[in-house]
Amino acid sequence: MRELDLQEKLASLPDKPGVYIFKDESKEVLYVGKAVSLKNRVRSYFQGSKDHSPKTRRLVEHIMDLDYILVDSEVEALILEYNLIKEHRPRYNIRLKDDKSYPYIKINLNEPFSRVLLTRRVKKDGAKYFGPYPNVRAAKETLDTLQRIFPVRSCNKELKDNKRTRPCLNYHIERCTGPCAGKITQEAYFQLVQSIRLFLEGKGNELIKDIRDKMNQASKNLDFEGAAGLRDKLLAMEKVLERQKIISTTGGDFDFVALASDGKRAFAQVFFVRDGRLTGRQNFTLEAADGEEEAEILSSFLKQYYGDAPFIPTELFLQHQIAEKETIERWLSAEKGCKVEIKVPQRGNKKGLLDMAVRNVEFLLSQEQIKEEKMIKQTEEAMVELAEVLSIPGPVRRIEGFDISNIQGHGAVGSMVVFEDGLPKPDDYRKFKIRSIKGPDDFAMMREVLTRRSKHIISEEALVKPDLILVDGGKGQLSAACEVLRGAGIHGIPIIGLAEQDEEIFREGYSEPIRLSRESPALQLLQRVRDEAHRFALTYHRSLRRKRTLASALDDIPGIGEKRRRALLQHFGSVDGIKKATLDEIMKVSGMNRTVSKRLYDELRGRNDVDE
């Protein structure tokens, strides 16, 4: 039954633009959305459920509370929605998969002798970022080529005025110009950095023309050694540019965004064109995209990708029209500082390149489908083998896996994951805060989690019960699990432990473990369940720890009380949003004065992580 205050909130929703936040019974954020009219949009979720998609019906079943934040415009709503999705990563929002951070090349413009280096984190810190690159190798090859042509420093030396040090090996092998030893002026060094920047921005043709002019001038001045050096740079750059396909002879910066979805999963691919040349491409996986229209998935991708992208082109070419086109265009134009257009090409070279991107991403989807078919076949074999190994009648279709996560007993949590027919079933996952155990006692924590779970197994007669219960660990964890479940009167459900060190399977009533081949489909299925339980527990543990850290980030600052904290979070959407704000922007928040704003500004920046 829904809480009474949810019904009261639904009845009092304003007919104004804003962002709404749905939460479950544990106050975990389920979904973040935006609306021109909060009243009409939010109420629509609770009316006419037969018209909803299966995903929306599942969402509504779990909604127990809601919050909303009023804004002044659609663009403000879009920005706040993006920030909240990034902050909470709600289960039912379409979101970019973040288990892999892609490498970028960073030019640190905040230093007198700027470094050019690799990083996996993009910040709004005044530096220039280029990428993402598909892997570290590709980024390193690009950086290596550039540093051979334009030898700028990559070391961590702190260069101070009038302080000279001995140049390192890079200087002697001509991979650095030795600014630490005063071997190059700041002006000349700046020109090297600018050359790298032009090249990474796709303006290699301009750079080649400039180098060719300097080479010819050196020849006229009979500086043949200087001309030869410039010639070598020229040849190296032309070799790199030859690998880039010319898309437009008139130049221009464009992104071609293609999407492929089969109703269960979705992939996006972006082709990057800079100064008329195809400079690279990148693939992206989108989570929670099942049952969504492709136009909606595409719109969600644009908001999340370009919210963090280091470069926004003047034109985006898509395969579908999207409902939020004008709002996203206004947002991107404001971010870039000039007009950005979203188009759907119908003919010509740009249509041809978009079609190529579509073919590529559709091939990626087909490969994933083939992989899934193979996985299904292996899983069927695994369920049959597992039943034989454990002497269980019939295939093992439903497995519940349990794990514990804590740091020396602190922030202890438990997880339950569910696999049905070999595949994860996230809607049935459960999280547990450990309430009764103090100190590092994993066995006692497992007992608490299984005690709470056993009550539901006994009472939920209408629900499907597991064919197998798996705990992460050996004899000790297995004994704790059996003691609780058998003591609660739960019989007939096999319980096993999987010890990670040697991947041994421990069974109730047997002293010796089962050892299966590492290639065994049954063992691989158990490993997937065990690893997923571990991942889910660890993610929950980290999220709780992060929430405590973020809350204290504001609570610990003198002058920031409950009222100011609420106003800041409502205005910027998150602590990360406050960190990115300028001092003037913070001062504009209701209730903030210059003294407190400056203190907050300095404190949050002092806590930023270094990304190198």
Image (tube, rainbow, N blue to C red):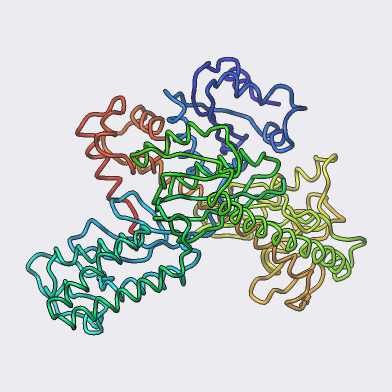
Q: Position of residue 382 (x, y in %)?
A: 82, 67
Q: Residue furthest right?
A: 393
Q: Residue furthest front?
A: 220
The quadrant of the picture occupied by the C terminus is bottom left
Quarter the N terminus occupies:
top right
Q: Position of residue 57 (x, y in %)?
A: 72, 33
Query: Does residue 336 appear to the left or right of 315 in the view shown?
Result: left
Total numbered badges shown on the rendered structure: 0
Left of 561 or right of it: where is 322? right
Q: Can you tell which quarter of the image residue 509 is in?
A: bottom right
Residue 242 % position (x, y): 44, 70
Q: Quadrant of residue 206?
A: bottom left
- Front in this rendered view, residue 382 or 388: 382
Q: Residue 588: which quarter of the image?
A: top left
Task: Pinpoint residue 127: horizontal percent, then vertical percent.
Answer: 30, 55
Q: Is residue 220 above or below residue 426?
A: below
Residue for point 50% across, 47% down: 544
Q: Residue at position x 59%, y 54% from top?
A: 285
> In terms of depth relative to the viewer, which is nearer, 454 or 184?
184
Q: Is residue 242 left or right of residue 235?
A: right
In the figure, 341 relative to 221: above or below?
above
- Residue 318 or 430: which is nearer the viewer? 318
Compared with residue 553, is residue 323 higher up or lower down, i.e. above or below? above
Q: Residue at x 21, y 59 (%)?
A: 111
Rendered view: 454 above or below 168:
above
